[in-house]
Amino acid sequence: CSPLLSLIDTSAVGLLSGTEHQAALNPAVAITDYAALLIAFMYTGTTNLVASSQEADRNLDDKPKAANYLITSIKLATFVGSGLGAILLLFGKPLLTAIIGNDSISPIVFSTALKYVRIRALGMPAAAAIGTFQAACIGLQDIKSPLYVLLAAALVNLIGDTVFVGLKHAWIGGAAGAAWATVLSQYVALALALKWLTTKSANSKSHDSSQTIFGGKLKAAASRFKLFNALSSTLEKSRKTKSTKKKSDNTPFSTRGFLQNRLKKRDILSMPSRESTADFLPYILPVTTTQVGRVSGYVAMAHVVSSSLGTASMAAQQIILSVFYCLCPIADSLNLTAQGLIPPIYAKDKSMERAASLKKTSKEFVKAGAIFGLLKMVLVSFIPLLCRFFTTDVNVISQVTTCVPFLMLSFVVHGIICAAEGKWLNTI
């Protein structure tokens, strides 16, 4: 959910704190968000492992293998996120100096950016755990649960920005205030995610209680009508079997209460076993290598703009990149969806039917990628109309508008590339 939170921060800071603070977000967000991309192997590994376990858990309602991978991933993500946060706290200043590249930049911009990085570093454990939760939900084909958490985080971040960003205190207001709002929203989202996973709905509890209280009476009634039930079930056996199977197949899975009695909130602070952690190792090298390739390009852009083009250009780039990152998940979802749908097909024995299914699925993902790319191009075309929600600086607005055609071109093949990457990662 980091792209959406960064977009909200960019808008709030630009409107409430001015161009200098918004410009400071450019190198600061580059460090925090790009660093977070380097632990994407956690998300890819979680999605693939949880999705692959579906075949083993096919006839088991409690999905023990998927649950074990989910618990392991959340525990591991907490430690990986803590390590990343520690690195940002210790090396935030030299990293900023490397991106900005010279001493001519405004001291206000540099000091503001450094505060933002150090504050955001405190939220990395929660950010990693939330990302893992979302990845697991996709692996379990539950698309609603991550949306609930994302919306809650966005709402808390928006409220926090409204309260903090307008303040004049150096460590609470401006860009620093936006950082505190983001960190707060991440921990609130983590708490909600854990609550969601470990608590079943009231309707489910009520249903269980009803079965316990009235179980004896129901059994007695059933025994009295045993003959009638036997006759009716014989007459309508075929119809009921087909109807039940169709209904079962179409019932969407929900992760709500999935880990009830299997995970306690304090368990996320305990280290997972070596055996379960080893399953994530094959994903580190290929995924991290891919992300380093992406990050290096973005860091190079941030370096050129920060070192050569000035404060207004830094603010303009921050707006453009915030929109870009917020739209990227539309196509990135194809990547994760492919990782969720294709592993169960790969898990089957090799056959003509398996090959045909893989080929058909791949074609459908390419088509979806092309459609998603066109959708994002249309959305980007509205940026000139939305600039007033990000800044009141006329110079910044002019530079943002100039870059819109190039941003549209970048989305032409983005969806297809993401779909292809998701399919490729399933061969690991």
Image (cartoon, rainbow, N blue to C red):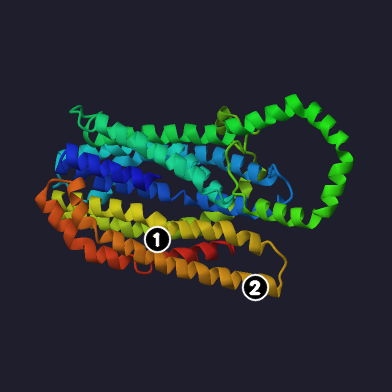
Q: Where, by quadrant of the figure, is residue 198 drawn?
A: top right
Secondary element under disc 1, as helix, strand or loop, is helix
Looking at the image, can residue 32 be seen? no
Reading the chain from its start, which is encountered first: label 1 or label 2? Answer: 1
Distance between the alpha carbons at the discs numbered 1 and 2: 31 Å
Q: Residue at x 31, y 39 (%)?
A: 117
Q: Please provide percent x and percent y for residue 383.
A: 23, 56
Most distant residue in the right direction:
227
Q: Quadrant of the N terminus?
A: top left
Looking at the image, can residue 345 be seen? yes
Nearer to us: label 1 or label 2: 2
> Alpha-carbon neighbours of circle 1 within 10 Å: few (<14), some, or many (≥20)?
few
Q: Residue at x 65, y 42 (%)?
A: 68
Q: Please provide percent x and percent y for residue 106.
A: 14, 43
Q: Amino acid at mark 2?
A: Ala
> Alpha-carbon neighbours of circle 2 within 10 Å: few (<14), some, or many (≥20)?
few
235 or 86: which is nearer to us? 235
Q: Please provide percent x and percent y for residue 412.
A: 34, 69
Residue of label 1: 293
Q: Please provide percent x and percent y for residue 354.
A: 67, 70
In the displayed structure image, the side of residue 305 where residue 376 appears, left or right: right
Q: Residue at x 71, y 49 (%)?
A: 57
152 or 112: which is nearer to us? 152
Most distant residue in the left direction:
394
Q: Amino acid at mark 1?
A: Gly
Q: Quadrant of the C terminus?
A: bottom right
Instruction: Say if mark 1 contacts mark 2, CB within 8 Å.
Output: no
Q: Where, by quadrant of the figure, is residue 156 drawn?
A: top left
Secondary element under disc 2, as helix, strand or loop, is helix
Residue of label 2: 355
